[in-house]
Image (cartoon, helix red, strand yellow):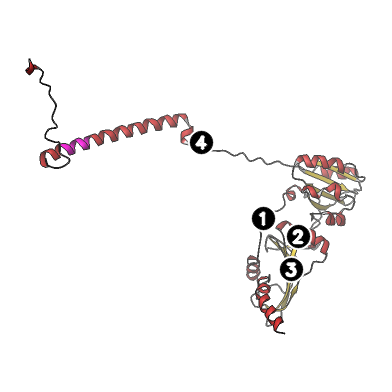
Amino acid sequence: MWANSVLAVLLAPAMASAAILPEALGDFEPKDIGPWLPPDKAIFAEFGFEEGERVRYVTPDQRSVEISAARFEDPTGAFAAFQWLQPAEASDSAYGQRARQSGDRTLIQFGNYLVEMRGAEPVDEHVEVMLAFLPRIQMSADPPVLEYVPLENLVPNSQRHVLGPVTLEKLAPEIPPSVAAFRLGAEAQYAHYQSAAGDLRMLLFSYPTPQIARAQLEEFEKLPGVISKRAGPLVAAVVASPSADEAERLLAKVRYRAEITLHHRNLTRSETLWTLLTDIIILSLILAALMIVGGVLVASTRVLATRYAPQSMFANPEDSGIVRLDIDGRR
């Protein structure tokens, strides 16, 4: 019994530091606290899930909200989890980096966190404060591949971010993981599109270099029922298309735009010939002026000291006159 008490005391700071959600949310007080477990452990492990917490908050007038917060290794994993759990029918909300709201359910992605609220919605300011004080928060830009996903005829809320073979098998089993080559640093964005011939499923793979994408395109072209295209470091693949023509029209919308940033270095004054010569002339004139002024000051000091303070160290010595050889007198 004594050992258990000591262990509880030792573990108390660690348990307190492991808390994710705040102790209060405005008028909402915590009533039920527990861990949050992902709905699909294999997929969320691929997303980099670390830990989660679930808290049910209740106000004095019995309004309640259940908030779950899950932390991931990086914001990309949280973004993938956000897209995986987002409702099919939802509207945008103003929380965090991105948020979707459907009925009394709000799903929020903020950095490397995924937050879900169900029930009575707290005051916006309290939610923003909660997000701002999440422990070990990380912020980064969105995955670059999102910039190249065609938006025309895109089915709302159909996109999913793919980070590994488990997610790929759930969404597009027609593409083997060996062809996707996640080991080479690939990521993909999955999306549904509407067309005259039926729904189209496209995956847009992003590779570190165009050379890797070119090599993997050859593997994609060997797959039956897959129509693919390369654009820079991107490989777009339409799987099980009801129409080859519609697949080609969709692939034609994938355009990679290389962004080259030229580093323009401003020349220094010493690297411009005319400015360099000008600086040399100005410096020479300044030195000459300093020499003249210095000579005048020394001479003036000597003259004044000789006249008014002949015994001072600044005065000319008595025998400091001109030395005469008196050659004429020696004849």
Task: Give the alpha-carbon distance from disc 3 to disc 4, as whole Å.
Answer: 54 Å
**Image vertical order of residue 113 relative to residue 314, above or below:** below
| Residue occupied by mark 3 | 52
The answer to whether one can see residue 284 in this image is yes
Task: Give the alpha-carbon distance from disc 1 to disc 3, as whole Å.
Answer: 21 Å
Quadrant position of the N terminus in the picture: bottom right
| Discs 3, 4 touching: Cβ within 8 Å | no
Labels 3 and 4: the sequence-earlier one: 3
Task: Give the alpha-carbon distance from disc 1 to disc 4, as whole Å.
Answer: 34 Å
Disc 3 crowd rating (10 Å Cα; few below 14, some 14-19, many 20+) is many
| Residue occupied by mark 1 | 140
Q: Position of residue 199 (x, y in %)?
A: 88, 52
Question: Is residue 288 part of the magenta span, yes or no?
Answer: no
Span of residues in magenta: 296-302
For label 4, the SS is loop
Disc 4 crowd rating (10 Å Cα; few below 14, some 14-19, many 20+) is few
Q: Position of residue 136 (x, y in %)?
A: 65, 64
Disc 2 crowd rating (10 Å Cα; few below 14, some 14-19, many 20+) is many
**In the rendered image, which quarter is residue 169 located in?**
bottom right
Task: Give the alpha-carbon distance from disc 3 to disc 2, as whole Å.
Answer: 12 Å
For label 3, the SS is strand
Q: Nearer the viewer, mark 1 or mark 3?
A: 3
Q: Main secondary structure of the magenta part?
A: helix
> Residue at position x 83%, y 61% from top?
42
Q: Position of residue 59 (x, y in %)?
A: 68, 80
| Residue occupied by mark 4 | 267
| Discs 1, 4 touching: Cβ within 8 Å | no
